[in-house]
Amino acid sequence: MSTLVWGAFLGGVGGAGLVLVVLRVAVLRRPQLADRVLPYLRDLPVRDQPPAVRAMSSSPTSAAAGIFGPVLRSAADLVERVLGGSTSVRRRLQRAGLDRTVQELRIEQVLWGLVGFGAAAGLSLVRSLGGVGGPGSALVLCVLGFVLGVFLRDNRLSAQVRTRERQILTEFPTIAELLALSVAAGESPVSALDRVVRRSHGALSQDLAGVLGRVRTGEPVGQAFESLARSTGLPIVARFATGITVAMERGTPLADVLHAQAADVREAGRRLLIETAARKEIAMMAPVVFFVLPVTILFAFYPGVLGLRLTTP
């Protein structure tokens, strides 16, 4: 066969593959029934809904899983068997506020690993073109790139958890004060919670919206806040949920409890800021000692040294 025939054949195969990928992506991006119905169902927690009712995700991971589903799921199952810890991963996903399953996260880890594998393969190719390294070192480098990508996604999840927890700590005093004001104005705890959730936006508001959704589906208020206390990774939020539960069960003035907790959080934030400043004090001296001070000495003594050189016979 001539080169022209081979070129036409390979071009046709590549074009057909591209058309299939475009058609599949178009199907995945088509609005689902859940996407059209769920916005009209207020305050229903997404995590507690059955899989058939949950909205289909349109993330790149879901698109990749839809196109290369069996291969990616097999690789994700292999990563799950090697790493384990699905309970810890599920808890971190919940604390990070990510509406994803453990398998979806494993698929993301596989994708990150493939990116690391591709980067390592490109580096190995450049090294081989320069006459450095052999096939064994290239294989080891590619494997290390894949493993590094997998662990980087796990580290990214932990960073997302820490970021969301910092946001919750920042929002907590304001949310607690708003709840206390609403309760002191005569509203019930559920009505106050509804008002605060509708008027605020943030990580803590999302958690309280989940609590409100569970309450409106028939779960007792104390049990809903106990679920929040068990799921959160912040002791302050756990004490907040437990304090509301105890106040409602024993008749303690809820507004006073909320004001006291908000004051405690502000005081804890003030102490943390002072401790952070004390730790950073030594680090702040490094640029002064190693950069500013030598330049100052140079500007102070260099004219004198230059004058001595000019006056020396």
Image (tube, helix red, strand yellow):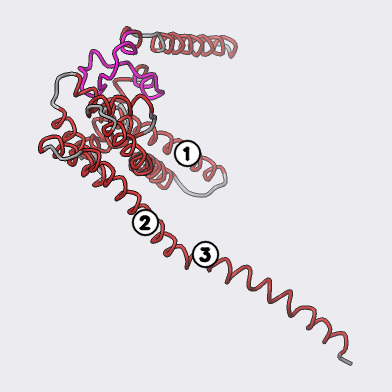
Q: Percent position (x, y) of residue 276? A: 41, 59
Say which amino acid is labelled 2.
Answer: Leu
Mark toward the viewer: 1 or 3: 3
Mark toward the viewer: 3 or 2: 2
Inter-mark Cα distance, 1 to 2: 41 Å
Residue 300 drawn in magenta: no
Q: Percent position (x, y) of residue 22? A: 46, 11
Q: Quadrant location of residue 97?
A: top left
Say which amino acid is labelled 3.
Answer: Met
Per the image, the residue denoted by label 3 is: 284
Per the image, the residue denoted by label 2 is: 272
- Please tell me which residue lies in front, 69 or 62: 62
Horizontally, residue 282 falls left or right of residue 187, namely: right
Q: Percent position (x, y) of residue 292? A: 63, 68
Say which amino acid is labelled 1.
Answer: Ala
Total numbered labels:
3
Residue at the far left in the pictured view: 250
Sequence order check: which comes first, mark 1 or mark 3?
1
Mark toward the viewer: 1 or 2: 2
Above or below: residue 166 compared with residue 219: below
Q: Which residues fall within the magenta stretch?
A: 37-65
- Please tell me which residue lies in front, 193 or 171: 193
Q: Secondary structure at mark 3?
A: helix
Q: Percent position (x, y) of residue 83? A: 24, 41
| Residue at 18% over, 38% down | 230
Per the image, the residue denoted by label 1 is: 119
Q: Quadrant location of residue 173?
A: top left
